[in-house]
Image: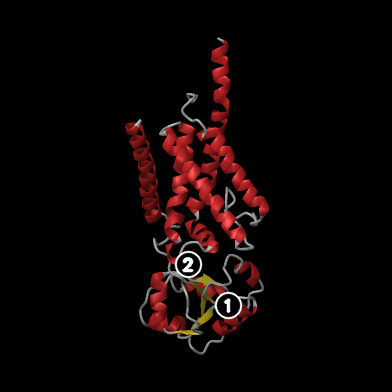
């Protein structure tokens, strides 16, 4: 009985993580899917890819985000979905950190605020790093030891 | 264990493939879709556009075209995709609020001798738009060439 309760309590952080990041990815994907040209302009601002290649990730990444969000909520293909989620978060964190290190003073266009006023700075770098770490510890750290709800 | 890992890799690949497929299909059918490879729309510093160049630009649809004539003439017929910004408007700031100041704009009016297109181009340059050109032959030459027009 007690073991059962302890096991159930162990699953809560994972469930909360799935719910939070599932909705987070879906809300972040929506404006990017509806405005791919604006998202491509955001990618060009980071000056990581050649300009000519900026449209391809602007088309595909938001849909990857959406599917990761949906699959997290639905709890299907768990490990692969969580891997892609971490990949996306780490990718965005690296982009923001690189832009900050290169001294770019610009709107990050990240998270759910594609058109928001999220200027790149320490705060954005810490926010993204924190989010990636929380994601990792909630959803990928020893993922197979407990069964999800 | 090895079998499990292979299964996870296949699942990851499946997620990427399904996302990419849906993305490409949606991009093709969506009105806000973009070309797979980005091409910078530019006027290469040109200040005047010929009829032949204008036809290409309209067909490609990548550069914003501004009709500098009065609204009533615009409503009777204008170049496909053109936006009405009368040259003497008092609302230039709000009418151009959605435009990127670094992106090219082309203005036109009725004929090579009408002054509205040049005046609007000057006002736009003063407002900070860096790449503004004028389609000198104007609406008259466009219709004389029997190119398509929009009416609304």
For disc 2, the chain is B
Q: Which colour scheme is used?
A: secondary structure
**Which label sits on residue A132?**
none
SS state under label 1: loop
Q: Can residue A109 be seen in this view?
A: no
Q: Residue furthest bottom?
A: B113
Res B39 → quadrant:
bottom left
**Which label sits on residue B152?**
2
For disc 1, the chain is B
For disc 2, the neighbor class at 10 Å (few under 14, some 14 to 19, many from 20) is: few
Cβ–Cβ below 8 Å for labels 1 and 2?
A: no
Q: Where residue A38 sits: x, y (%)?
A: 52, 59
Q: Residue furthest top?
A: A1
Q: Distance between the residues labelled 1 and 2?
A: 30 Å
- Residue beneath label 1, please? B130
Q: Can residue B101 be seen in this view?
A: yes
Observer-nearest of A98 and A127: A98
For disc 1, the neighbor class at 10 Å (few under 14, some 14 to 19, many from 20) is: some
At 57% from the left and 25% from the top, the residue drawn is A12
SS state under label 2: loop
| B126 w.r.t. B151: above or below | below
Q: Residue furthest front?
A: B2
At 57% from the left and 81% from the top, the residue drawn is B121
**For the image shown, how many numbered marks are present on the structure?**
2
Q: Where residue A14 sits: x, y (%)?
A: 54, 29
Observer-nearest of B17 and B30: B17
């Amino acid at each position: 009985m007690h073991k059962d309760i302890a096991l159930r309590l162990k699953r809560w952080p994972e469930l909360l993580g799935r719910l939070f990041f599932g909705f987070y990815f879906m809300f972040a994907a929506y404006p990017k899917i509806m405005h791919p040209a604006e998202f491509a302009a955001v990618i060009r601002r980071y000056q990581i890819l050649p300009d000519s290649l900026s449209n391809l990730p602007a088309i595909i990444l938001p849909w990857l985000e959406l599917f990761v969000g949906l699959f997290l909520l639905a709890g299907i293909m768990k490990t692969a979905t969580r891997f892609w989620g971490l990949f996306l978060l780490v990718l965005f964190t690296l982009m923001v950190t690189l832009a900050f290190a290169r001294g770019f003073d610009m709107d990050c266009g990240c998270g759910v605020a594609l058109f928001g006023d999220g200027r790149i700075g320490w705060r954005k770098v810490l926010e993204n790093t924190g989010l990636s770490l929380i994601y990792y510890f909630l959803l990928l750290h020893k993922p197979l030891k407990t069964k999800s709800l | 264990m090895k079998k499990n890992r292979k299964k996870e890799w296949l699942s990851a690949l499946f997620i990427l493939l399904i996302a990419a497929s849906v993305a490409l299909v949606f991009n093709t059918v969506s009105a806000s879709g973009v070309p797979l490879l980005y091409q910078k729309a530019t006027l290469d510093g040109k200040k005047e556009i010929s009829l032949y160049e204008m036809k290409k630009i309209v067909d490609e649809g990548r550069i914003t075209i501004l009709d500098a004539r009065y609204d009533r003439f615009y409503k009777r017929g204008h170049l496909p995709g053109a936006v009405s910004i009368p040259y003497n408007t008092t609302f230039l700031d709000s009418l151009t609020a959605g435009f990127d100041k670094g992106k090219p704009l082309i203005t036109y009016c009725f004929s090579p001798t009408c002054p509205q297109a040049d005046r609007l181009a000057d006002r736009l340059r003063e407002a900070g738009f860096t790449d503004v050109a004028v389609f000198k032959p104007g609406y008259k030459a466009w219709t004389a060439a029997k190119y398509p027009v929009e009416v609304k």
